[in-house]
Amino acid sequence: MNDRFNMDGHKLHWHLDRVTEWQAGKRIAPLHIDMGISRSCNMACCYCYGVIQGRTGHGTEMKKNFNMPKDVILRTFDDAKNAGIRSIALIGEGENTLNPALYDAVDFARSIKLDLGLATNGLIVVKSELEKLLRGLVWLRVNISAGEREAFKKIHNVDGFDRVCENVKTIISTRNRLGLKTTVGLQMVVVGENFDQILPLARLGRELCVDYLVIKPCSDTGEKTLGAPTTEYLGYNNVYEVARSLGTEKYSVIPKVSKLMNVGKKDYDICYGTQFLIAVSAEGGVYPCGHWFNVEREKFLMGNVLETRFRDIIASQRYWEVQERVRSVNVHCDCESNCRQHYINGYLSHLMSPPDHVNFI
């Protein structure tokens, strides 16, 4: 099946109004926010970038962490919608289902017609709130990086494989019973320890009747803090194709091949993408991207929604000073590999450096 969600790429082609304003040098509002509403997590995945972002503890230590207050979430959603942000993905540094305000927040997003997505590890499904959740989300994605019980435990450090599978079945059956259009998928983060889980997980996704499985490489720091593989990905191209072939008319297997095969290297030198896609941490910090949640945080902090309205932050001089500072970052060693802005950075970089004889299309 084709990548009908265009996950191995970007969607700026469908937002050329904002791109044109950016090319003209205007101070634009972002198109999208990656947002966290909880710093807690009930897993300890071996590839967790949230640990680099400053999240500590899991399981019994979760009480040490923080949930964003509901009034702040709703206010930020409202400000974002009014400022021209077109979507928010709750994919922050923790497990956002641990914040009890999630369900009212999703309901509020629906009421103001703000496109909202949610990534979860799938351990928690509150059945009494599931209808509200599915009615308010454009998509729900379960992050699972193994298709077999023992491998799941090794990768996620939790014995929860059966529970996650049952919860996915509940989500799918509820969506279908209600006749909703919410897209439900799985995401696999590939690291050295789970290459052999690509095909089992592709088969599992088909059995669970989800809409897709997306397969992406682990993002890592310039210092390779998480030990993400590089050249190892290259030898698995055939596996990606076999996995893709397991798709059906209703189920897509989508390897992010361009990321899996680029060994973490970038074909651009400047990050422009943060002007279109920014991040808000569960503690309220507004940053160009999630990499800066716990790295030079004071240098790249634009403001905090717990203290200042989001609308005022993105209109502030500080916001644009930080956006300008991003351009001086060495993207080849001071950023994470295959980051959220990676696809759009390639596109925007080409726009800023047109080839000779551009009229000869």
Image: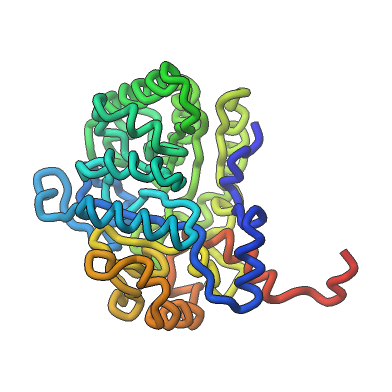
**Relative depth, front residue between 297 and 111:** 111
Find residue 239 and report its horizontal and vertical position in percent: 57, 37
Residue 105 shown left or right of residue 359 in the figure:
left
Res. 141 visible in picture: no
Up the image or down, 277 lies above or below 102; here it is below
Find residue 277 and report its horizontal and vertical position in percent: 48, 62
In this view, which residue lies farthest toward the right?
360
Up the image or down, 338 lies above or below 325; here it is above
Residue at horizontal 22 percent and vertical 50 percent from the top: 70
The quadrant of the rendering that contains the N terminus is top right
Residue at horizontal 64 percent and vertical 62 percent from the top: 17
Q: Quadrant of residue 168?
A: top left
Up the image or down, 349 lies above or below 91; here it is below
**Relative depth, front residue between 68 and 91:** 68
**Relative depth, front residue between 134 and 159:** 134
Residue at horizontal 56 percent and vertical 46 percent from the top: 7
Find residue 360 and report its horizontal and vertical position in percent: 90, 68
The quadrant of the rendering that contains the C terminus is bottom right
**Relative depth, front residue between 102 and 357:** 102
Q: How is the image coloured?
A: rainbow
Residue at horizontal 22 percent and vertical 55 percent from the top: 68
